[in-house]
Amino acid sequence: MPVTPKDELERRIKGLQAVLAVNGLDGALVLQNADLFYFTATAQNAHLYVPVEGPPLLLVKKNLDRAREESPLPNTGSMPSLKELPAALRTYGYQVPSRLGMELDVLPASHFLYYQKIFPSTGIGDISQAIRELRAVKSPFELDLMRSAARLTDEVFAAIPTLFRVGMSELELAGRIEGAFRRAGHPGLVRMRGFNQELVYGHLLSGSNMAVPSCVDSPTGGTGTGPDFPHGAGFKAIGRDEPFQVDYVGSFHGYLIDQTRLFVAGKLDPRLEKAFRTALAIQAALAGSARPGLPAGELYRQALQIAGDAGLGAHFMGDPQSCGFIGHGIGLELNELPVLAPGFKMPLAAGMTIALEPKFLFQGLGAAGIENTFLVTAQGLTRLGSLPDEIVYL
């Protein structure tokens, strides 16, 4: 299992400290699992205090031995009770901050109120956007992990034809594919940021189910298993001459890859064939035009123009309701920065990783599209995986 180098963590923490200084904050308290893992290399139940200057302090509630084994941070100790946090800071030689940054985009309100109570003289501000921006640009170490995730994902996708038979349900095929992912080391968890953001591996949908809308912020939805989890694979059988689309998230050492391929046992409807070719054209155009400095939302505008020119604008990224984006950042979480959406002005930067997913949906018929994960470089977008894009005929 890869171990995050100490100098990698030090670089990340220095980046956070620079943000704290710019924003006039004395320190940051990091709690959320993905952020905690990013800065410490462990996801044990802990609080990471990062002062604006000096070494960080990792206070662990459970399990201290594992945290010390997993994290190379030198200042690691126990925190028996949350109410003792201010006292623990003093014990380890840290001043209680006057201004503290926290991840207010994901911190429950009840927790926020409690931290206000135990830090009565401390002003608490939001540091979540700054952390997300730091995480958006990947290091060579992170990119190596994402390439490993891509290789794992490619291997599982390449085996899908051997796992499928006509007449099996979406759920049965999903179970077989997910079993292959688990055998390859996938933890089964897809981390997403935000309230009520839930996903199990991804979406495996077939035929008309591919265009069933749902609550999830995605071009596809599907029936899911019922009203309690209303998106993703359902009980529908997959027939001959009926396409199915696998949109799954691979994972390696916490880092994610988002990938979609289209399969069909028999013939594909010409409307879906045209939509698929248009999706490939969009992917190629955006991969060539994306450059550091380009506002992320500009890629959506380009994609929408190509879809409209092909006469498919009404089906682009949803039918009847578009999800409103063409791609998203990805890394430790599925929905990282940047978002390739209208009005999103964050400029692309070298080292960002984005999942580009042009897709078209047709009510009562199905869907067609492609998705790959790319690295932003000075020359454009470079794919992290190598699986062929073409429709797989079974």
Image (spheres, rainbow, N blue to C red):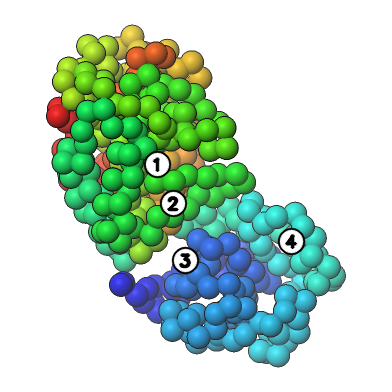
Q: Secondary structure at mark 4?
A: helix
Mark 2 and mark 1: Cα distance apart in space: 8 Å
Position of the C terminus by quadrant: top left
One can see residue 350 in this view: no
Mark 3 and mark 1: Cα distance apart in space: 23 Å
Position above or below: 236 against 91: above
For marks 2 and 4, give the one nearer the viewer: 2
Nearer the N terminus, badge 2 or badge 4? 4
Position above or below: 29 against 86: above
Nearer the N terminus, badge 4 or badge 1? 4
Amino acid on which the number 3 mark rests in the picture? Tyr
Amino acid on which the number 4 mark rests in the picture? His
Residues tagged 2 and 1 counted as in contact (Cβ below 8 A): yes
Considering every residue shown, the one lying at the far front of the view is 167
Residue 370 in the image, given as x and y percentages of width and height: 28, 31
Q: Which residue is mark 2?
A: 190
Q: Secondary structure at mark 1?
A: strand
Mark 4 and mark 1: Cα distance apart in space: 30 Å
For marks 4 and 1, give the one nearer the viewer: 1
| Mark 3 crowdedness (10 Å alpha carbons): few <14, some 14-19, many ≥20 | many
Amino acid on which the number 2 mark rests in the picture? Val
For marks 2 and 3, give the one nearer the viewer: 2
One can see residue 57 in this view: yes
Nearer the N terminus, badge 3 or badge 4? 3
| Mark 1 crowdedness (10 Å alpha carbons): few <14, some 14-19, many ≥20 | many
Q: Which residue is mark 4?
A: 111
Residue 164 image-quadrant placement: top left
Frontmost residue, 203 versus 385: 203
Q: Which mark is residue 38?
A: 3
